[in-house]
Image (cartoon, grey):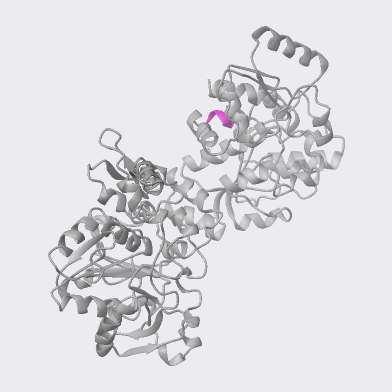
Amino acid sequence: MESLLEKTAITEKTQESRHTIEQVSHNSCCGCGACFNVCPHNAIAMKNDRDGFLFPQVDKNNCISCGSCYQTCPVLDPVSSNAVDPSCYAVWAEDDIRQKSSSGGAFSLLAEYVLERDGVVCGAAFDENWQVQHVIIDNQHDLEILRGSKYVQSDTSDIYKKIRKILQTGKLVLFSGCPCQVAGLQKFLRGKYSRSCITVDIFCHSIASPGIWQKYLSDRFHVENIDTINFRDKDITGWSCRKCTVSINGKKLSSEEYVRGFHRGLYARTCCENCKFSSLPRFGDFTLGDWWGINAFNPEFNDDKGTSLLLVNNESRQDIVQEIKQKALLFKEVPLKYIGKNGHIYGSLQLPPKRPVFFDMLRRGVPFTKALTAVLDEQYDFGVIGFWYGMNYGSMLTSLALYKTLLNLGHTAVLINKPHDLWGPRYSNTISMPNRFFRSNCLVSDRDSNFYKLNDNCAAFIVGSDTVWNPVLVNKHLPFFFLDFAAEEKNKISYASSFGRNHYKVDDPLLRQYSRYSCRRLDHISVREDIGLDILKDEFGKNGTRVLDPVFLIEAEEYRALTEAGPDMKEKDKFIFSYILGADREKITAYRRILDSLKLPAVNFPNPNMLPEARKTHPLEIIKDDSLENWLYGIDNAHLVVADSFHAVCFSLILR
């Protein structure tokens, strides 16, 4: 008879077998490919997501829910038996090897050790399209293609299966890769071949998107004309990481563009922010990297030709250490405390806040250089003036739509902040609903004074949409919304701006005169309503064009993408959505008649501009989670929309 313990173990094993790799979150998956390699029924394919990273996709028709992929995923069980205080060495190979290497040439010493014993070496190399993949070599001549840093995630494809097949013949294998790839191989091999499979993990700053790398190459070069690529060309900058060189038809071009973004983590995979493999104990038998900061221990260990930092994480590999040190110019033990911040051993990479915005720009077709310059150097094609910071869904969405439209046209843009004394302090609060939303989805200027300095950052300016020319709303700041701060040579544009009323009245004669002057400086003027054309002509002596509100310029699916990422409102049954800005008795009475007639539950959104005291006395039961994402979700999924809002009607039409 089975014991209770045995029955429990069998039950747990059965439950585990039902798991698939799909249960690993998108933000946790490292794309190592172990699940793809281990699947016995070829039910998993590694596919690029929209940002160019490889993720596993399960074919339900072939999957038998055996659980092999789930059990092999290194992210789910990141445990290493290696030393928490490994031996630590500063290493120089011979000078000719160091010159060909990114740092001190320690990888070449390890690789030569294996090749001299009739083994094979597996590492990252460029393919014919200058993407990076893992390949296997069996001779020292081919070692050249594995040397040097590649600042992009490699495609492991079916390399783990190939390595296992070689190991089964009794050959020695050296595998070099990012820590997560080493962990993936070890999980795939299930602890076998621990002596004949030598693993080397690198000090990995992050695993960068192959899609971003391809975008950079295609935007800057004709890929078919490239002869060589060197991320760390010592002929140009010595031992540093500042510039990448690309040789085209024999001519070497150097650039720091791609490298700048890489070092800031701009292209990093999301799992890098909470890396499970960078800390001690490491997963490889050895860990390799540049020893930045070695001067703190001994300045003589830095001759600007490159110094490798070598960790020996497994004492059983000391026999290899004794062999390779015989061929080294420098092989000195250094206390582990001098490792410093190398390799994020004592803390993961922090992803930059602007990373999602950078990826969004590239997805929309903004050239790589433009996007990078906007994010890192604050240089933009357009500075956009609007009410994006307003506690109003329509104001937020007009600014969002205009911003996204500019990106879709290949331009970069920044949303310019409000004058510091326009409206109350809650509109400047960086944790307000509009501020939180836009700082996650757009580039936002933090300047709230001296707008003339923006001429150094923006090639042109555009104002609109919404009621930006309503004197009652903006008062003394009316000239600002006519772009009075923009330099004469800058292109100054109005798109779908509105006066927000049927007549224009400014009591202050100086303000009225200066506003007229500022308006007449605009190069191109369009307005949202017919009445705006009349006011322009009568008051300012200017002609304009009537155009669509910008919310109609982008597709419904762009708005739905926001509702997929952000809302916490998940109504499933039929419901009525209401957005009644003027909650007077007549409107509320009419609305309640609708509710009584249709007998459906209601989701009532308040005016987000409403103060907390007013919310408490609102005549309707209003929703508390009134985010922009929830507002869009409510309109999109409602059985009926009841509203007195212009933009609620717009989005009822857009979302059908």
Q: Nearer the viewer, residue 404 or 519?
A: 404
Q: Residue furthest bottom?
A: 300
Q: Nearer the viewer, residue 463 or 486?
A: 463
Task: Look at the picture and state if 34 lies above or below 645.
Answer: below
Give the side of residue 492 with respect to residue 10, left or right. right
- Residue 652: x and y in percent read 58, 21
In the displayed structure, 646 sits above or below 119; it is above
Magenta residue span: 548-553
- Quick one: quadrant of the N terminus? top left
Residue at 78% of width from left, 39% of height from top? 474
135 to the left or right of 448 = left
Looking at the rendering, which quadrant does residue 576 occupy?
top right
Q: Is residue 641 visible?
A: yes
**In the figure, is residue 557 to the left or right of 527?**
left
In x, y percent, where is residue 537?
Answer: 70, 28
Percent coordinates x, y for residue 459 in the rendering: 56, 51
Residue 483: image location, x then y, percent: 68, 45
Q: Is residue 183 magenta?
A: no
Query: Looking at the image, which residue is at 67% across and 33% down?
Result: 626
Going 60% across and 35% down the picture, which residue do you hit?
568
